[in-house]
Image (spheres, helix red, strand yellow):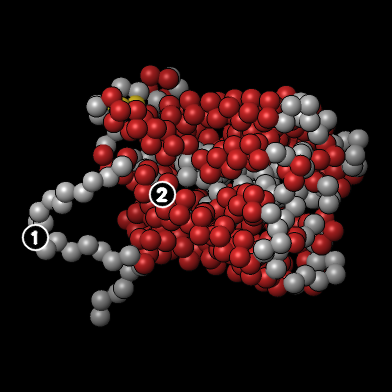
Amino acid sequence: MRKKRFSPYFVILIGFFALILVGFCLLLLPISTTDGIKPEDALFVSASAVCITGLSPVTLSETFTGFGQAVIALLVQVGGLGFVTIAMTAIAILGMKLGISNKLLLDETLGTGGRLDYRRFLFRAVLITFISETIGFILNLIALRNDFSGGELVWVSLFHSISAFNNAGLDIFGGSGMTLYSSNVLLLINTSLLTIVGGLGFIVFNDVFCARRWKRFSVHTKIVLVMTPILLLAGTLVFYFSEWGKIDFLNAFFMSAMSRTCGFSTQDLSGWNNASLCFLNLLMFIGAGPVSTGGGIKCTTCFVIFAALFAMLRGRHTIAFHRHVPHRAVIYAMFVTIVALIYAFVTGTILCAAEPEISMAFLFTETVSALANVGFSAGVTPLLGVAGKLVLTVAMFMGRVGFMTVLLVFGKKRKETGVRYIDADIITG
């Protein structure tokens, strides 16, 4: 009898779903909360942690005990690295061979096409994570030493470091979150750098470690390293001038960095004007780099779309850093963007129907925040009903596993029929 093999896409989908369910069960335990929690809230927080989003209908420091917070931190860590990366790392540490099926699964998760030495890549990914979070932890100890002490200082610093590097945006500071620390320069800079580093992607670090020279970097690495400062600067300037008089330059930079899919906020977004929220949604939608702890459609996707647009206007082939961009890459970038836009519109519309009393601008910001795995909120999440929370939970899951993964799981494989149809003349534009 022939053994049925599951596709890598199915394993990725089920893996993340299983992690969310495990976290959901653990957070429902009496030992995890101070005074119990609603099932829909436990599911929401678990999905937010695994999908490294940061939205939460409850205040973590008040709702969860030390054990519950530790569960959330672990879910964030696993969700940030990706359960596939952690599983493959365990296999490598135990000395087991990475079989063809495991390598195929890594190919689909990392999108590398089998061009990497997986053992070294996985080792470097874990090492970068450990070093970054350790440095961030030490700096947090210094930055928060006047507000916390003893074991509480250690735990808050560690939790925040893990959450920042993994672009989760979950905090245990209390109901006000990071708004109370808008003048803590070291904390803002440290959190921003952790978020930026985590959002670059492990492939970029692997490439930088191996090539070490700009000329030898892959086109992927060059795009991420160019797009990251451009988006950071654009966000900083727009927020600074759009919210003139209400935000200083450091906090404008911090909010721009957080829009890369982290979600910590030192500002009350409910008081921002529509222009600021609109650009914030754009930055969240674009997101960070591929194979990183960030979300969004990815900055490389944005780059390819604009490169293709300018190439079409000039009547030339799409070129990036003196390399030809394959037609399939352009089609893929456009497909991902269009599907994400449609899903965001549909989800936002459903959310508006479920919560008619809440501002549409806030609901769509919440929708994009969930879909792009960011975590920014204008204070809407705690006000949502069960239906609204479930809608955002699905959005967070879809944003983390990726639309292509879901479509390839349920889509049918194309069969070659040998039939070629006549081209259709369609007027567009």
Taking the spot 57% from the left edge, 50% from the top edge, the residue there is 368
Give me the disc on residue 419.
1
Within the image, what quadrant is residue 387 found in? bottom right
Within the image, what quadrant is residue 269 found in? top right
Residue 167: image location, x then y, percent: 62, 44
Judged left or right of residue 25, residue 224 is left
Judged left or right of residue 293, residue 319 is left
Within the image, what quadrant is residue 242 found in? top right
Give me the disc on residue 210.
none
User: Looking at the image, can residue 26 be seen?
Assistant: no
Q: Which residue is mark 2?
A: 338
Taking the spot 10% from the left edge, 54% from the top edge, the residue there is 422
Taking the spot 80% from the left edge, 57% from the top edge, the residue there is 59
In this rendered view, identify the residue nearer to me: 44 or 113: 44
Check disc 1 and give the amino acid type.
Val
Residue 345: image location, x then y, percent: 51, 55
From this view, report whether residue 375 is shown above or below residue 329.
below
Residue 32: image location, x then y, percent: 78, 66
**Element at badge 1?**
loop
